[in-house]
Amino acid sequence: MNKETVDFFVIGVARGGTTSLYNYLQKHPDIFLPKVKECNFFSDVESLDKEVYLDPEEGKEYHMKIIQTTDVYNQLFSKAKNGQLKGEVSPSYMWDKGSAKRIYDHNKKAKLIVSLRNPVDRAYSHYLMHYHTGYEKAQSFEEAIKAPRKTIWGGGNMYLEMGLYYPQLKAYYDLFNKHNILVMVSEDWTRNNGKALDEVYEFLGIKAFSDYNTEEVYNVSKQLKNKGLLNFLRSDKIKRSLKKVLPEKTKEKIKEQLFYKEAEKQQLDNNLYNSLKEYYKEDIKKTEALIGINLFQKWDVE
């Protein structure tokens, strides 16, 4: 069975608005996205969560899986209608060094969409997400970025490294026609939410579309409560038992009510913020030259 030919990929970045893009794009009648938001089929990544390795069940929605076989990957696109563009959203494709070549070998004419975010803000948001969901134990961001690196994708702590965009993007620019790569700045398009997606639709060669709620915010940072109980329920034995008796959506609703609340806005220490701006300065300069967008101005990191 040959791979389904996927027409476009949203390749990143993590914590850069890819979940919002997924939710908006899947509502367009000319686009088909699988029910797995992040398939990770073209990346060689691992996760601390063993559940993501299990094959997705038909009809169920998942935020992340690590799809390992062509047959399972093809099945995700089996409901696509004639004429629909098939797309996929996996931020690991930006990070994994081999993904660009694998995607190129799959479809050298594929269109690629990237949403870049101020790398300092991206790193801090990534830390907060992992801390509030239990992956990260460090009590402060400064402590977390000084800790030994866990280079695993799902649950790792490569907060700073993932914001070094130049080498990640260059792998794609070296292989693909630059006209097949659309780089968006997260801070720009998320201000207007769905209204800014006309640029994406024009890039994909399909009609504009706006039949969605642009006020809805996706994948906001959540703060953890009842952490001890949640860690107990995360054990493999308990998870397997719950899987047998509770549908996925029911489990997610219970988790939202019992274990999460919207996180309070947290500010990064000014001295740390300024030192991280210096850390990223050279990479931003090279990224600007590669993509032709004035990132220093947009992110105020000069």
Image (spheres, rainbow, N blue to C red):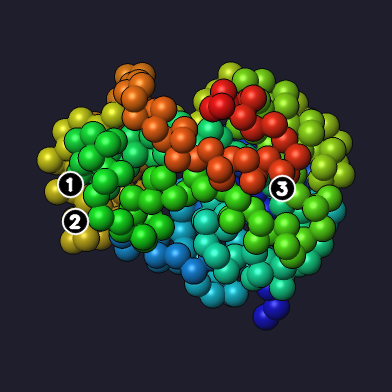
Q: Position of residue 82 (x, y in %)?
A: 82, 56
- Residue under pointer 2: 235
Mark 3 / mark 2, whichever is N-terminal:
2
The amino acid marked with disc number 1 is Asn
Dot 1, crowdedness within 10 Å: few (<14), some or many (≥20)?
A: few
**SS at circle 3:** helix
Classify residue 133 by image quadrant.
top left
Question: Do residues under tags 1 and 2 come within 8 Å of each other at their CB atoms?
Answer: yes
**SS at circle 2:** loop
Residue drawn at (23%, 40%), measured in percent from left and top?
143
Tag in front: 3 or 1: 3
Q: Nearer the viewer, residue 5 or 152?
A: 152
- Residue under pointer 1: 231
Residue drawn at (80%, 53%), measured in percent from left and top?
178
Residue drawn at (53%, 38%), measured in percent from left and top?
281
Q: Position of residue 207 (x, y in %)?
A: 86, 36
Mark 3 / mark 1, whichever is N-terminal:
1
Q: Nearer the viewer, residue 145 or 79?
A: 145
